[in-house]
Amino acid sequence: MTTVAPSTDVRRHELAEFLRSRRERITPEQVGLPRGRRRRTPGLRREEVAQLSAVGVTWYTWLEQAREIQVSQQVLDALARALLLDTSERTHLFALAGTFDPTPHAPCPTVTPALRALLDQLGPVPGCVQNSRYDILAYNATYGQLLCDMDRVRPEDRNCMWLAFTHEDWRAAVVDRAEVNRVMAAKFRASMAEHLAEPAWKALLHRLESESAEFREVWARHEVVGQANKSKYILNARVGLLHLEHTNLWLGPAAGSRLTTYTPLDEETRERLERLERLALGAAAPAGPPG
């Protein structure tokens, strides 16, 4: 009879092998350590990796021995830095550990060139790519002018929750804002249930609670709502009232990234979106030579 090892066992052994292989390829000089006496093995020693990442030598040794221990995201982040992992290797490390990378602004493999092209071709329908934390990872020209001037928002602030509760232009564009924001907070709470210990989620929650009394009030209700498509009204500052169907198209597991679109529900809205797209593309176009 053949016994198949549990997936967690396989993952732990893959993680151990991966760490060992990355450790053995790095020379002491690469990380600012003296070479010292003659080495019997290539690369860094385990105690040196432990020193560089500020973890215990015994704990790191157990990790390379594939023992059943818990690994925090902070430790994985420290190991990734100590072992000089590139973007792909870092992603692989967190995947083997079965957790999410807490670095919110790391390059996102979800947004491929093909997906960016699709966003542009959706115009004049506004579209963006969001992750489960409501970070806006990419957007087309119409979405960039739908609720606020997204290009003028700092990349670290391009988050729907943050903008809904703190950005003046965004808030002015949302019709029935109190109800919309209440539902958004309930959706955010439902999404956060799987990410309670993750630093990026905790940091966003702390920012919202610190900066918005409205958010603190709705968050204290402990309401939970699942994701669903719905119609909504948006009062755009440049073209007027828009009646739209909000749709999520999942790019992977339902708790992950999604393509969000705002389809016009009447002809007047479509015409206004077409005008908004022309305005957005015109603003983005470089100025011509002087006449």
Image (spheres, grey):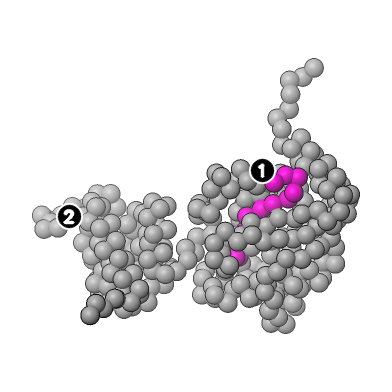
Q: Quadrant of the C terminus?
A: top right
Answer with left or right where residue 254 lies relative to residue 85.
Answer: right
Tag on residue 120? 1
Magenta residue check for 45? no
Task: Residue 269 in the image: state x and y as whole percent.
Answer: 85, 51
Q: Quadrant of the N terminus?
A: bottom left
Tag on residue 25? none
Residue range highlighted in magenta: 121-133
Q: Amino acid at mark 2?
A: Pro
Q: Is residue 152 visible?
A: no
Q: Secondary structure at mark 2?
A: loop
- The residue at the point 77 percent across, 51 percent down is 146
Residue annotated with mark 2: 42
84, 239: nearer the viewer: 239
- The residue at the point 67 percent across, 61 percent down is 248
Answer with left or right where residue 192 lies relative to residue 2.
Answer: right
Q: How many marks?
A: 2
Looking at the image, which residue sits at the far top? Answer: 291
Q: Amino acid at mark 1?
A: Asp
N-terminal of the pair, mark 1 or mark 2, is 2
